[in-house]
Image (tube, rainbow, N blue to C red):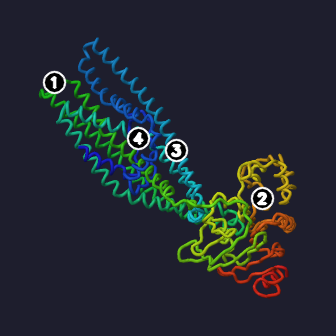
Amino acid sequence: MCKHACSMIRDMADNRTTATPPQNLSGISRPGRGMQVVKPKNLKGTLLRLWNLTAGKRKGLGWVLLLSAFSSAAAIVSPRLTGSIITRISNRDTITLLLILLAGLYICDWFVKFMQQFLMAAIGQRIINHIRQALFGKIKGLPLRFFDKHQHGELMSRLTNDVDNISTTISSSITLLMTYSFTIIGIFTMMIILSPVLTMITLCSVGMIFVLTKVVTRHTRKLFKEQQKYLGVLNGQIEEGISGLTVVKAFGREKEMEADFDKKNENLCKTSIRALIWSGYLMPLMNVINNICYLTIAVTSGLLYINGKLSDIGLISTFLLYSRQFTRPFVEIANVYNNLQTAVAGAERVFEIMDEEPEPEDRADAAELENPKGEVEFKNVSFGYDEGKTILKDISLKIPAGKKVAIVGPTGSGKTTIINLLTRFYDVNNGSIYLDGKDLRDYRMGDLRKVFGVVLQDTALFAESVRENISYGNEGASLEKIKEAAASAGADAFIERLPNGYDTVLEQGGMELSQGERQLLTIARAVLSNAPIMILDEATSSVDTVTEQKIRKAMLKICENRTSFIIAHRLSTIRDSDIIILIEDGRIAEKGSHAELIELNGKYAEMYRTQVG
């Protein structure tokens, strides 16, 4: 029977949508129905790993298991008491006692279910809190290579939706699974004791439900898989449409975008209707089978009573109640199994991130970086983000300490890649990069990162005050120092115009400021870091020409006595650099000062004359 029941549950779980049964046996809130089920690749392995991950956070789960056994007692004992009441209907004293027992049983059942929910709420949230912390801790330690290959929205989905699916399963599904398992075993045992003949009739109905589920799920499995595919396509369309709405409006493509959306939405709608129609067959037909079973047991038990095979009239009522209650838990467990599969699939997606290789750890003999001078050397460096596609090709370059270096070249030539390697956001594929005569990989990562003051092309501000954004990474800085850094970057004027000046909270992470103002704040942040090596990656790309001149003067000031690397397309901002390097197709095409390269009359001179007219 158990093997048959397990097979039935698996097939019922393959059906993605089930209607609500007539009655909630447990009284515990059920997980959502009609949800899409994503099947895990390794159910047992992932569950075992999830169990190991939550070690020490499951305190109280044993009590929940015990309460589940008590909770199922109401479903097992109450029909027997009801039958006894019917049998002794003429005995008023006995009836009163049995009714009091039945009422007490229902009250205890309510209390047990309340305690179950209370305990599981605490256990579930402790576990989910632990999983979120573990996942977020892993994400912050991953290298940039990982984030380049994964969309931010996808990572957010794993940290929120997938973890929430696990939370739902832990909080609700586990309790239901325990309770229904005890209920099935208990009711089956009671039915066998009362009447093996009537039990066989009930099992026949279970077999018919099993066959019905097989037939329905054969169709719904394919349809829901197709629905999931169309849903993914539609979600991609929505994300692109919203994120690129400015471009859509600028080119007047609203109608085309809407038509494309309508087409994809229509495909999803048609597939969903077919899937839901097929899955909708299941519950009505189940009810028909249950009703036929109910009628068959009623007639059979009546005949047995008339022929003297049953001596207890109340047993008929008891068995009818048992037959009703026996099949329902199978449907409920199927729904729980659906939720379990979706949660385990989400756990697999979480574990995929947790299995990613973290940033390289410091070597055991990693040196402490003290009082860096800022001498940098690239020696035969080659690198590619993807295997088989080399971006930098045999780069050799030596930068004396305190020199200002500008890196120019066409888009995609490898300028930013040089900075990524220098800061060890990535490690070289071949060759070595040296700082003060020692390979970057020989230093402690934490020490190395403090050497660089970085202003990237993409500004990154946080939903904190202007003051906190500028002092990010230098929390002990005084307001006076913060104002000096802002003044050096040319940001003090617009900051003073903000409602609360330096205490103004950027509630949208800086989106309420212009692109140029955001860039000025990131430059002020780099200035405040007072790092020995300054990196400015397209720092003036988003500002007007007047602001550009302010930044250029600030750059000259903050780059004094520091090794600095400046990536720029506006060549007017890097004329004062000590060394200008032209990168073309991943190689150093030209190198020298501005005057030397103009005199060389090569690619740089051509680019400069084109820009200045």
Q: Image quarter for residue 525?
A: bottom right
From the image, tell me which residue sits under label 1: 311
Q: Is residue 220 above or below residue 324?
A: below
Query: What type is the residue that disc 1 sits on?
Result: Ser
Q: Tell me the number on the disc at residue 174.
A: 4
Percent position (x, y) of residue 92? 28, 12
Q: Image quarter for residue 593?
A: bottom right
Q: Rounded to the nearest whole Å, what is the CA distance between mark 1 and mark 2?
A: 95 Å
Evaluate if marks 2 and 4 touch, with contact meaning CB atoms under 8 Å apart.
Answer: no
- Choose mark 2 or mark 4, whichever is in front: 2
- Choose mark 1 or mark 3, whichever is in front: 3
Q: Quadrant of the C terminus?
A: bottom right
Q: Is residue 527 above or below residue 187?
A: below
**Horizontal relation, residue 139 to residue 370: left or right:** left
Query: What type is the residue that disc 4 sits on?
Result: Ile
Q: Rounded to the nearest whole Å, what is the CA distance between mark 2 and mark 4?
A: 54 Å
Query: What type is the residue that disc 2 sits on?
Result: Asn
Evaluate if marks 1 and 2 touch, with contact meaning CB atoms under 8 Å apart.
Answer: no
